[in-house]
């Protein structure tokens, strides 16, 4: 009793150095991924113990490969050690209280005693049984000591019992992890990782079925040899079935080697005395010396039967053989319903967007044909659809953002709209104003040749150019290029500030029926990706931050950076200069006229004075 208490204290001291960890921590997630890979290796290792046994056809006996057995025992010990570390982790891993999951994600329980009790009442006993090194003990201790190195038949029975006894609990614990999920969420978040896991689970099923088929085939060969021994008169023949064993003389052993009934056990024809049924191909396979060759063919057989649902198998009347065939059919149906279905969904998901694009194009073509659109307009619609698909890949970004928390939405929008820093107007703004504008911005796409604004039409949006080139054409034919970082329709902001005011009740006075008319045409020279701020959204922003936007520095920035206001300024300067030139010409002309009139009026008066002098 005191000894047990001492061990408990030592374990508690060891666990005290490990803090209680959050199951959603990155380290825990990385460990879970590593542990899943370890589990996959572990459940692949156990069926390989079946291939330790083979048949020597010349000697009519079963032999066990001890070097291969030792290698498998070492690998199995490594995976068991990893699983034991995972068990220790469960004593320091917080869990979500089931009663707190009524609302939200639930509360994490991080008290060490409660965490330990929760695991002890859960899967601890099953995990403890799974991690027991039973095959290693049988191979390295029990079989050499009690059976002897030549006891292949007994080794086969002991190994089959221990491996199968532990394999079912291992499958129960490992398969949910291999499915990519745990109690704390998804282990592998990548779709490709889950696809690979599903594919490996299909390989695992073929591996298990093929290994069991090999073992059961070997068992049938063993049964045939024992039946031949029973029907013969050779003394101690039952001990000769184990290679290297037997207490009989060399003469009896030679008689067993030449026994016709024992040799008939390797006859797999239709006239064979022993009916092997579905194990007919496994008979000669068990006589191969190469374990790799025996495993590869067994794996192929397992894949073939799972894929065809054992459609080509004709079992004998042996009951266990019939049950094994039925199990293969049931496992194949289960795999097609679960794993193959998941893999099919994943492969279809890869082409789902492309399928959606094809269906949309077909609907658009039907609609254009139904509405009898002209050829040129149809060509523009097709170009717009292709460009929209290339830019968005069929993903609705607004719908994705709407499901995220507000602070993440704000940071994502700031990341999207970094181009706003290229606009001098927005370098003067604080983050609250920029966030309000970014929240209203919506992505829009224009193809080459499209008109964003046209002369005489309404200006109902501000367009912030992300990628592409445009051309602004004024009424007098002057052109101004627009490119990445420029703004189109910025006059709408000034117009809202100039044509609205605030009353005493802090309510905005709207001028119904008034709207800004474009005095220029803005045409896309290339395909353009842009973000648009609609008039209604701009009206809301100006009403909310009107005091800031009326700042002279902001107004100056608007007029200085805007190609529209530059064109207006240039036009007014030209008009003023022409007016001044006309005024100067009129002034000079009138001055000349006055001078000529004055000279004409002076000449007669001078002639009269000269006449009087004369």
Image (cartoon, rainbow, N blue to C red):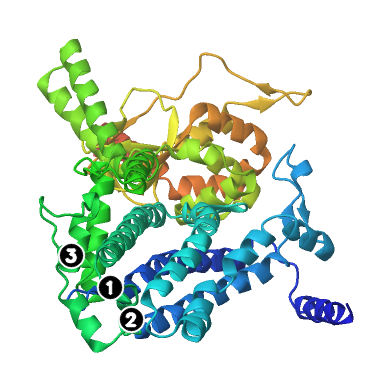
Residue 39 visible in this rendered orientation of the protein: no
Alpha carbon of mark 3 to alpha carbon of mark 2: how far?
26 Å
Q: Are marks 2 and 1 in contact (CB under 8 Å)?
A: yes
For marks 2 and 1 on the same chain, the one whose residue lies earlier in the sequence: 1
Is 360 or 298 nearer to us in this picture?
A: 298
- Distance from Cα at disc 2 to Cα at disc 1: 8 Å
- In the displayed structure, 155 sits above or below 424; it is below
At x 75%, y 55%, the residue is 121
Of tags 3 and 1, which is closer to the observer? Answer: 3
Say which mark, if any, is on residue 54: 1
List the single residue furthest toward the front.
233
**Comes first in the chain, label 3 or label 1:** 1
Residue at (60, 51) in percent of width and height: 429
Q: Position of residue 182 (x, y in %)?
A: 57, 53
Task: Using the image as rendered, state which of residue 453 and residue 71 is in the foreground.
Answer: 71
Q: Position of residue 240 (x, y in %)?
A: 30, 78
Q: Residues within 10 Å of mark 3 (few under 14, many from 20)?
A: some
Whole-angstrom CA distance, mark 3 to mark 1, is 20 Å
Say whether marks 3 and 1 touch (CB < 8 Å): no
Q: Which residue is mark 2?
A: 65
């Amino acid at each position: 009793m005191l000894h047990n208490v001492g061990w408990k204290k030592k374990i508690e001291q060891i666990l005290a150095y490990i803090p209680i960890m959050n199951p959603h921590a990155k380290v825990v997630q990385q460990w879970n991924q590593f542990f899943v890979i370890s589990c996959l290796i572990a459940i692949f290792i156990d069926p390989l113990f079946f291939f330790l046994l083979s048949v020597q056809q010349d000697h009519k006996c079963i032999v066990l490969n001890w070097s291969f057995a030792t290698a498998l025992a070492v690998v199995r010990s490594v995976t068991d050690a990893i699983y034991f570390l995972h068990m220790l982790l469960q004593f320091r891993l917080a869990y979500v209280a089931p009663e707190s999951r009524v609302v939200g994600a639930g509360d994490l329980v991080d008290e060490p005693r409660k965490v330990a009790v929760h695991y002890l009442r859960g899967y601890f006993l099953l995990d403890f049984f799974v991690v027991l090194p039973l095959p290693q003990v049988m191979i390295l201790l029990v079989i050499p000591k009690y059976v002897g190195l030549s006891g292949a038949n007994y080794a086969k029975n002991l190994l089959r019992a221990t491996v199968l006894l532990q394999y079912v609990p291992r499958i129960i614990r490992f398969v949910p992890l291999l499915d990519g999920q745990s109690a704390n969420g998804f282990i592998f978040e990548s779709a490709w990782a889950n696809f690979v896991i599903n594919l490996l689970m299909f390989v695992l099923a073929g591996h298990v079925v093929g290994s069991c088929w090999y073992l059961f085939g070997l068992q049938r060969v063993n049964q045939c040899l024992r039946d031949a021994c029973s029907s013969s008169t050779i003394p101690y023949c039952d001990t000769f079935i184990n290679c290297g064993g037997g207490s009989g003389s060399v003469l009896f052993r030679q008689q067993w080697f030449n026994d016709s009934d024992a040799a008939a056990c390797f006859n797999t024809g239709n006239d064979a005395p022993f009916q092997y049924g579905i194990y007919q191909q496994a008979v000669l396979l068990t006589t191969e010396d190469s374990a790799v060759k025996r495993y590869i063919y067994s794996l192929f057989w397992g894949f073939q039967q799972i894929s065809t649902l054992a459609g080509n198998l004709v079992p004998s009347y042996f009951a266990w053989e019939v049950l094994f065939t039925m199990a293969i059919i049931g496992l194949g149906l289960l795999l097609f319903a679960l794993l193959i279905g998941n893999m099919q969904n994943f492969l279809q998901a890869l082409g789902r967007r492309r399928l959606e694009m094809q269906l949309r194009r077909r609907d658009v073509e039907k609609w254009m044909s139904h509405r009898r659109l002209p050829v040129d307009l149809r060509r523009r619609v097709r170009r717009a659809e292709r460009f929209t698909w290339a830019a968005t890949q069929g993903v609705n970004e607004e719908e994705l953002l709407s499901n995220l928390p507000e602070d993440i939405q704000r940071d994502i929008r700031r990341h999207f709209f970094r181009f706003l820093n290229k606009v001098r107007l927005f370098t003067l703004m604080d983050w609250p104003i920029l966030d309000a504008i970014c929240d209203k911005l919506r992505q829009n796409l224009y193809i080459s040749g499209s008109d964003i604004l046209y002369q005489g039409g309404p200006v109902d949006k501000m367009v912030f150019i992300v990628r592409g080139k445009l051309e602004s054409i004024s009424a007098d034919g002057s052109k101004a290029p627009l490119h990445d970082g420029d703004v189109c329709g910025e006059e709408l902001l000034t117009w809202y500030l100039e044509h609205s005011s605030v009353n005493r009740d802090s309510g905005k006075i709207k001028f119904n029926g008034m709207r800004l008319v474009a005095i220029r045409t803005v045409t896309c020279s290339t395909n353009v990706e842009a973000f648009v701020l609609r008039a209604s959204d701009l009206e809301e922003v100006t009403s909310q931050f009107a005091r800031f936007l009326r700042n002279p520095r902001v107004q100056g920035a608007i007029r200085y950076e805007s190609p529209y206001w530059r064109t207006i300024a240039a036009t007014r300067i030209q008009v003023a200069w022409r007016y001044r030139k006309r005024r100067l010409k009129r002034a000079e002309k009138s001055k000349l006229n006055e001078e000529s009139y004055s000279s004409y009026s002076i000449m007669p008066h001078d002639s009269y004075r000269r006449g009087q002098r004369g």
